[in-house]
Amino acid sequence: MRPRSSAPRLLCAALAMLTTACADSGTAPDTRAAADSLTALPRALTVTERQAITASNDFALRLLQRTTARQSGNVLLSPLSVSLALGMTMNGAAEETLTEMQRTLGWGNANRADINVAYRDLMTMLPGLDPGVTVRIANGIWMLQPMTPVVAFASDAR
């Protein structure tokens, strides 16, 4: 005859204590509160901001697929940074180049001003979403001297 393990009895005792602890509060624990704290936003997103998130996620997945298809090791990249950098440079594009950049970034034929506002507002909101995480976005546009940017481009990119 084999000795009986005490593990099943310990497990039952632990479950009984857990059930009792939960029952003492009068209600079942609300797991939605923990999940909501991870997804809660300080305000409702605009339609264009939601489009920015969808477009950026789609772009990120396509970028990662294409990047890793040729790599055999680990890959580290920031799709958000790439998307924002291309969004900034898109302000200097026109005609076919603008259309292709909008398509690549997932914006379709969205208005450039709306795209800039969505990127700006999301970049402002992102660092404050989780106080335990530090987000710093350091994209920039650099030009060789003596070149100077077109004023409208510099304003839109800013």
Image (tube, rainbow, N blue to C red):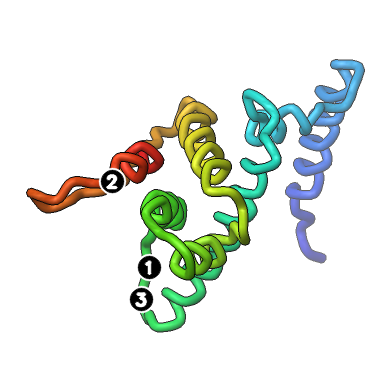
* Visible residue check, residue 20: yes
Q: Which residue was labeled with disc 3?
A: 73
Count of residue discs:
3
The picture quadrant where one finds residue 45 is top right
Instruction: Tell me which corner region of the image, top left, top right, bottom left or bottom right, holds residue 15.
Output: top right
Looking at this view, is 94 or 18 the one in front? Answer: 94
Amino acid under label 1? Answer: Val
Residue 63 place in picture, x, y as percent: 48, 68
Rounded to the nearest whole Å, what is the CA distance between mark 3 and mark 2?
A: 41 Å
Drawn side of residue 139 relative to residue 64, left or right: left
Image x and y of residue 43, in percent: 66, 25
Rendered position, 62 above or below 10: below
Tell me which residue sits at (52%, 33%) in the image. Answer: 121
The residue located at (75%, 47%) in the rendering is 6
Q: Residue 83, relative to residue 25: is it above or below? A: below
- Badge 1 marks a residue whose secondary structure is loop
Which residue is labeled 1 in the image?
75
Please give the name of the residue rendered at 86% of the width and 30% of the height, measured from the top-left corner.
19
* Circle nearer the N terminus (1, 2): 1
User: Are discs 3 and 1 less than 8 Å apart at CB?
Assistant: yes
Between the residue at mark 3 and the residue at mark 1, the CA separation in whole angstroms equals 7 Å
Q: Residue at 66% across / 44% down in the picture?
A: 50
Tag 2: amino acid: Val
Q: Which residue is mark 2?
A: 150
Amino acid type for the residue under numbered disc 3: Gly
Q: Quadrant of residue 74?
A: bottom left
Query: Is residue 60 in view?
Result: no
**33 with respect to 82 (left or right):** right
- Disc 3 crowd rating (10 Å Cα; few below 14, some 14-19, many 20+) is few
* Mark 1 → mark 2, Cα distance in angstroms: 36 Å
